[in-house]
Amino acid sequence: MSHASGRDIHVGYDGDFKIRFGSDPSCDHIVPQLPGITAGLKRSGDRLFVKDYGDKPGVTINGKNIRKKHWVEVTRYDKIIVYQILLNLSPKVFLGRDVVDLDSSPLRLILPNGKILCDGAYIRAKNGTVTAIMGPAGAGKTLFLNMLNGYKSPSEGKVLINRQLDLQLDYISIRDFIGYVPQDDVMIPELTLQQSLNYRLRLRYPDMPSSVRKRLIKGTCESLGFQRNRLKDFLNTVIGSPESGIRGLSGGEKRRANIAHELVLKPLLLILDEPTSGLSSVDAEHVVKLLRDLARQNSMTIIATIHQPSRDAFKHFDDLLLISLGGKVAYYGQADKAVSYFEKTTGISRGSQNPPEYIMSFLSEEQNRSRTVTRFKKTLGHVKAGSKEYDYIHDFDSKSLSQATVQQSGKKVLKFHKIRALYQNYRQWLVLLHRNFHVLFKDKMNFFLLFGQVPIIAILILFAFHNFGHDNEALDSFARKIYFFGQLKEPFEQQNKSVPVDSLLRQAGLKANDEPYRISEFGSRQRGAVYFMLVAASIWFGIIGGCKEIAAEQHILMRELRSYVHLLPCLLAKISMLILLVGFQTAILAAIVAPILLRNVDEIISPTNPIIYND
């Protein structure tokens, strides 16, 4: 499992493990310089923990002693010292899984009407490499990515992870280590980058300590090229967006922030859709160089669509997949050999042209596109025949893919971790509810509109009904007299006696004055109109709030649902927030309107004081 070499400790990185190291013979890892059973190291999933077994504190993380005999989580950015010995751990130890290779057979996507959107595109992406996907607009590059990341199922063909896991059959267990960065900057603009990344980690790892989250966020952003003061500004700046009117990160910073949202979750496979879109040539080159460095340092498999990169940016790609219209492959092989391939097969010299421009020129016209696709098919024939002339071309290995042992464990994982999933849903609901209110209070304009409309609607209701009590005052008084007169004359009629009308009218008038809360049918209708307006306003509050939430966070919700967040806690968090929000709005509205327009409401609804319905 592990061995020592000088002061370095090397640990195997296949699967979960738990080891102890020290000088004691019972230790899994013998280190003569350490006393007895000194410390332990374990990994669960993609998280690593350290424990101090010693009688005295001897294990420090970033200069601080850890709590004795308790597992403490560590990250790849931490400095771990065991009795003055630096614990050097390979980055692969923190991954929790082996590296990822992505292979596919030729993929086809056919619509019900027979239209073919993808016709034979395939990929063989290896860990530690960056594959660029290029092609004209409408060629289906994003569609191809969606089939590679599991968002879209191909009509024909399959995508395998390490030739063992079928992406479609076992997506639930695979999605944890797939990162997807969409073309648009899908982030919450009201939050700072620090806050946004913190929420992302809390949703994925509900029990992760805040100190560990901070170190992961800091280390991730440092790997993106931000240091010291620039790192601090980057993390504490609001993300912003043109649509929200909030000024925040610049275009280049926003692209890297978008990538950070995936890197912070430690993916093994990173798929990006147009990561350089809208950036200057300098920023675009920085992003592409960053992707290459990430692939090398973390043994990641990176696939990205890109639209005609600069000469310098193009140098950082390992492989190039060129897709023509209809999802047909026009070239797939080493990126640095693409120019020589086209010069050899077409007889047209590149001259001083930018390599990507030269390559894309063969897909500019329909006739050229057809010839380019046909030439590549012929080249693949030479490769299949064993020709070494095109050893830089990547052919799909149909025989190997068909013989691959495919596992299907996603449903078993869900069933096995049913209780854990319920707990995770509960924790995600809490985090999402907290984030919803955080965003609400940060968005001052929306907050003002939500609560500013309450007094405005209250004033309009008061203005519409301010005089309704006086409008029917005489009618209510007359109705009360008639009501009491009817009660007083009833005994006389039952005994067949003459009714003293004048005397009973005077008594009825006195009773009517003593009980002013009794109202006529006309008065009750007007009060019913007030209640109707209050209910209608409450429904309005709920609809406006709900529509805004759905429209504003639709893309964010889709991104999170495709990775690690479940739909149920998302819905419950939104509903919970809207219930509390609308409840507060209606309480304010009722507090303003009811004391003025419905001041006798307690008497009206009292069972001892029924409403009079008189015509």
Image: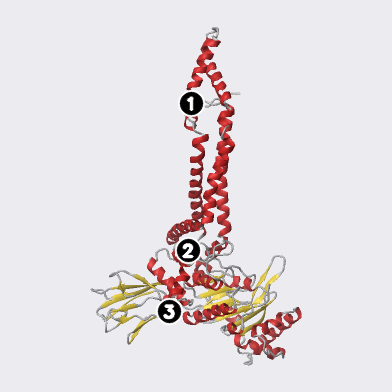
Question: Looking at the picture, how far across and down is residue 448, in whole percent?
Answer: 52, 52
Structural distance between the alpha carbons of marks 1 and 3: 78 Å
Question: Looking at the picture, how far across and down is residue 420, in whole percent?
Answer: 42, 61
- Dot 2: element: helix
Depth check: 91 or 123 in front? 91
Depth check: 301 or 445 in front? 445
Which residue has dot 1 on it?
609
Structural distance between the alpha carbons of marks 3 and 2: 28 Å
The disc at residue 83 is: none
Q: Earlier in the sequence, mark 1 or mark 3?
A: 3
- Quadrant of the image containing the C terminus: top right
The nearer-to-camera label among 3 and 2 is 3
Structural distance between the alpha carbons of marks 2 and 1: 60 Å
Which residue has dot 2 on it?
414
In the current view of this chain or complex, which residue is farthest to the top?
497
Q: Is residue 117 left or right of residue 578?
A: right
Residue located at (56% from left, 52% from top):
546
The nearer-to-camera label among 2 and 1 is 1
Q: Earlier in the sequence, mark 3 or mark 2?
A: 3
Depth check: 613 or 517 in front? 517
Q: Earlier in the sequence, mark 2 or mark 1?
A: 2
Given contact means CB atoms under 8 Å apart, are the residues at marks 3 and 2 in contact? no
Q: Tag 2: Cα neighbours inside 10 Å, few (<14), some, or many (≥20)?
A: some
Question: Looking at the picture, how far across and down is residue 239, in whole percent?
Answer: 52, 66
Q: Does 380 sit above or below residue 215?
A: below
Snapshot quadrant of residue 79: bottom left
Which residue has dot 3 on it?
91
Disc 2 marks which amino acid?
Leu
Whether residue 378 appears in this view of the structure is yes
Q: Does 552 sit above or below residue 521?
A: below
